Amino acid sequence: MFRIVLICLTLATTLVTSAVVYAVDDAPSARHVEYPTYTAHANGISLAYQDFGEPREGTVLLVMGLGAQLVAWNDELVFSLVDAGYRVIRFDNRDTGWSEKFYDAPTPNWLTGIRFKFGWSMNPPYLLSDMAADANALLEHLGVEQAHVVGASMGGMIAQIMAAEYPQRVASLTSIMSTSGAAELPQGKVQLDFSSDATTRDEAIQATVQLVKQFGGRTADIGDEAWTKRLSRFYDRSHYAPGTARQIWAIIASGDRVELLQTIEQPTVVIHGSDDALIPYQAGEHTAQLVPGAKFVLLDGMGHHIDAESLPIIVDEILSVAQRAK
């Protein structure tokens, strides 16, 4: 476990661009549509968000993962939910995208790993619970009394905390490619190369392309051109590696959610890819075992991405668990 923490902290201090990608367009010539982005003052900080559709059936909040921006949520997923009658809100977590950056806050280093090893306080600038409070405050700011919360990877961790700590706000929970954080779970097999000497935009993007191609599943075979297109969009929208470092720090310092998950009472679905090389599917399986009455969905061939084949299944599961909450 200590080795894993040191790897994460090394990654935190060497990231060149957002390393986690959740949906990939496999048509390199396709154009992205940029939608209006708004700013809310919530939980004492500024959060950037996008807002789609009308809440005829309710509201869905999409919570993204480590270092990833709101645009990492596939537009097709967003508009599939809108077409089903839902208002859909996606936002940039703190320290990411166009949301507020904690410029004056420290970033983790190898000493942080030593503190973890000896059980000393890690003193991060914020925890996952603070990020959950951000999301809850955003919903309050937007006048949303209840939402169906969907989180991917670190976003799944945040969504889990929201469901437990703000039960009046969360109508249902969808946790995708995430984990309970239990120490005994198998670790991912992604090989991290910290020897990159990337100094330019293009070098940074290409280094990240080589990293995310290891995340497993069908999208691992998508050509470099498609990866480059998507990662270029992320880099050009916002490039802020220290924020990703502090989010890793928050994950490690927050500990596991084993006891917390057992208190969740809302309808819950846990979705994971069978070929996830970053967070193995056993982590999702364990999450579902802990949440009373949770449904576990294992998607054959999906890695740590929402690929084109998995997307409609995931949409159906989000809609199904939302209906269970009524």
Image (spheres, helix red, strand yellow):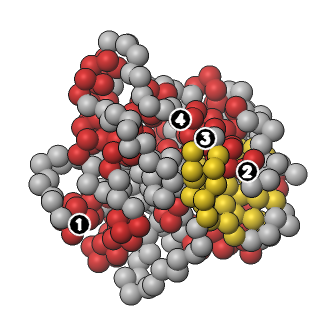
Residue at x 48%, y 59% (from the top left corner): 98
Residue at x 41%, y 82% (from the top left corner): 27
Q: Is residue 26 rendered to the left or right of residue 5?
A: right
Mark 4 against mark 2, which lies toward the viewer? 2
Q: Position of residue 158 (x, y in %)?
A: 58, 41
Mark 3 against mark 2, which lies toward the viewer? 3
- Give the mark, 1 or 2, whose residue is nearer the N terminus: 2
Q: Position of residue 36 (x, y in %)?
A: 60, 73
Q: In this orientation, does residue 179 appear?
A: yes
User: Do the residues under discs 3 and 2 have CB atoms within 8 angstroms?
Assistant: no
Q: Is residue 278 rendered to the left or right of residue 34?
A: left
Which mark, residue 261? none
Disc 2 marks which amino acid? His
Kind of element beneath mark 2: helix
- Give the mark, 3 or 4, whose residue is nearer the N terminus: 3
Disc 1 marks which amino acid? Arg
According to the image, label 1 marks what residue? 201
Q: Position of residue 293 (x, y in %)?
A: 74, 37
According to the image, label 3 marks what residue? 44
- Rounded to the nearest whole Å, what is the CA distance between mark 3 and mark 2? 12 Å
Disc 3 marks which amino acid? Gly
User: Do the residues under discs 4 and 1 have CB atoms within 8 angstroms?
Assistant: no
According to the image, label 4 marks what residue? 128
Around disc 1, counting alpha carbons within 10 Å, would you say few (fewer than 14), some (14 to 19), or many (20 or more)?
Answer: some
- Rounded to the nearest whole Å, what is the CA distance between mark 4 and mark 2? 20 Å
According to the image, label 2 marks what residue? 141
- Rounded to the nearest whole Å, what is the CA distance between mark 4 and mark 1? 30 Å
Snapshot quadrant of residue 107: top left
Kind of element beneath mark 3: loop
Kind of element beneath mark 1: helix
- Rounded to the nearest whole Å, what is the CA distance between mark 1 and mark 3? 32 Å
